């Protein structure tokens, strides 16, 4: 895997589910109270696998599964983890009706799958994780920070992941 360096963006290839999980865990280990991660990608691109990795990095020991039908699964780890799935929603207003804002501004970490359905209501600072299907096992991953907190987070993630 090799990063394509652009200002404020990290673009790289994950070669397996295990690698995707490990990269998520590395990001999870850097997250702090109140952080929001917005995951965007088609079905089967690895959003839930990435969330499972982040959750491991946050010391969640429970089995992490997609909350497609319940909208939110809550887990305890180093910080509270709110795994939110907006797949069944059609717009940001529906997200607000079930309390999405409460999870994003809580003291835990909000991990939002299908976040592109609620971009209008995301806080000013968050990290986007875009996932693209390349082959059965390979995924293109693009990290885009919004706000100074996440620009610094991306720098630290790059350093810990790709520095030699």
Image: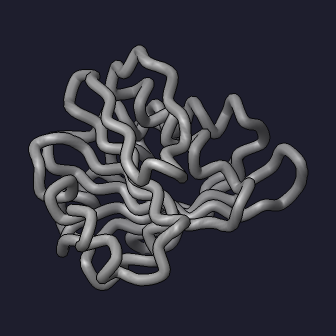
Question: 18 or 112, which is in the foreground?
Answer: 112
Q: Which of 70 and 144 is in front in this view?
A: 70
Q: Eyeballing the image, is 155 above or below 93? A: above
Left or right of 17 on screen, residue 120: left
Residue farthest right in this picture: 136
- Name the side, left or right, on which 79 lies relative to 46: left
Q: Is residue 15 above or below residue 123?
A: above
Residue 123 location (% of width, % of height): 19, 71
Residue displayed at 12% across by 57% down: 105
Look at the picture and state if 73 lies above or below 87. Answer: above
Q: x, y (%) of residue 144?
A: 42, 68
Identity of the residue furthest to the top in this view: 61
Residue that appears at 53% across and 67% down? 88
Q: How is the image coloured?
A: one colour
* Residue at (41, 31) in percent of width and height: 55
Q: Which residue is drawn at 42% across and 73% down?
A: 7
Q: Is there any visible trace of residue 87 in the rendered image?
A: yes
Instruction: Tell me residue 157's x, y (percent).
Output: 40, 44
Q: Can residue 151 be seen in this view?
A: no
Residue 79 placement, left or right of 64:
left
Using the image, determine if residue 128 lies above or below residue 153.
below
């Amino acid at each position: 895997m090799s990063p394509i360096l652009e200002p404020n963006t990290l673009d790289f290839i994950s070669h397996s589910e295990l690698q995707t999980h490990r990269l998520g865990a590395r990001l999870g280990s850097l997250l702090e109270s109140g952080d929001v991660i917005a995951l965007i990608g088609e079905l089967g691109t690895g959003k839930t696998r990435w969330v499972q990795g982040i959750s491991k990095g946050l010391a969640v020991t429970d089995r992490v599964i997609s909350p497609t039908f319940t909208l939110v699964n809550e887990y305890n780890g180093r910080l509270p983890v709110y795994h939110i799935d907006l797949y069944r929603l059609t717009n940001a207003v529906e997200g607000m009706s079930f309390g999405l804002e409460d999870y994003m501004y809580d003291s835990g970490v909000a991990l939002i799958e299908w976040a592109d359905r609620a971009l209008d209501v995301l806080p000013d600072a968050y990290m986007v994780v875009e996932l693209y299907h390349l082959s059965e096992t390979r995924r293109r991953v693009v990290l885009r920070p919004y706000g100074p907190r996440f620009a610094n987070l991306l720098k630290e993630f790059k350093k810990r992941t790709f520095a030699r």
